[in-house]
Amino acid sequence: MKYKHARTDKRIAMGAIGTLMAMSGAMIWADDSTATPPLALRKIMQDMDKNMLIMADAISHKDWPLVGRIAPLIAEHRQPPFIEKMRIMGFVGTSIGKYKAYDGSVVEHAQAVGRAAKSNDVQGAELKFRTLQASCDSCHSEFQKSFVAHFYGKKDAAQ
């Protein structure tokens, strides 16, 4: 008997998710403006970029307490809302494993920079920061241009 209720609950949940996705699609189509509203991911990336710049400056000035405060902001960055995340996952498609691995790499390396900063490990912090930057650059090289073209209809990813 318990099993029957679990299936019903699952159907209700799936129906609710489908309704939400249909509603979001309808709202997008109902918007007749020519400008595409930015995804929440854009603001998340802008915040991460700002924090990376602050971290780079703090490392160059050997300001380890600041590096230690900024590292978690990068490692624990916000995530897009559920519906947007589903759209992104649909776009990324079969490369979702690689996309998630890049995000995991950013988390891992930002945490490592924070640990190195807390222990005043100058070389470690600098090395881990370069590795963190390389993770960001690799993801952007692979996904950014096609992502911007897909979601914003622009051929140039310099947004």
Image: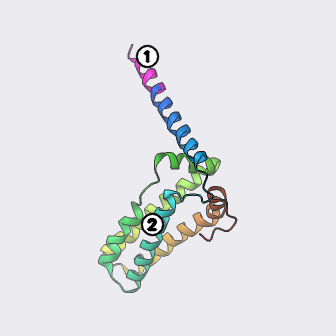
Amino acid type of the residue that numbered disc 1 sits on in the rendered structure = Lys
Q: Main secondary structure of the magenta part?
A: helix
User: Residue 134 versus residue 6: which sits nearer the camera?
Assistant: 6
* Disc 1 versus disc 2: nearer the observer: 1
Boundaries of the magenta span: 1-11
Q: Amino acid at mark 2?
A: His
Closer to the camera in the image, 75 or 17: 17
Locate residue 106 relative to residue 25 in the image: left or right.
left
Q: Return the residue at label 1.
A: 4
Quadrant location, the N terminus? top left
Q: Find residue 35 and report its horizontal and vertical position in percent.
A: 60, 60
Vertical placement of residue 73 versus 26, above or below: below
> Which residue is rendered at x = 63% and y = 59% of the image?
152
Asked which secondary structure carries label 1, the reply is helix
- In the picture of the structure, the residue carrying the numbered disc 2 is 109
In the depicted structure, whether residue 92 falls above or below residue 8? below
Seen at 55% across and 58% down, the residue is 37
Task: Determine whether the residue tagged by mark 2 lies in a helix, strand or loop.
Answer: helix
Kindly identify the residue that appears in the image at 40 percent across and 76 percent down: 55
State left or right for residue 25 relative to residue 155: left
Quarter assignment of residue 144? bottom right
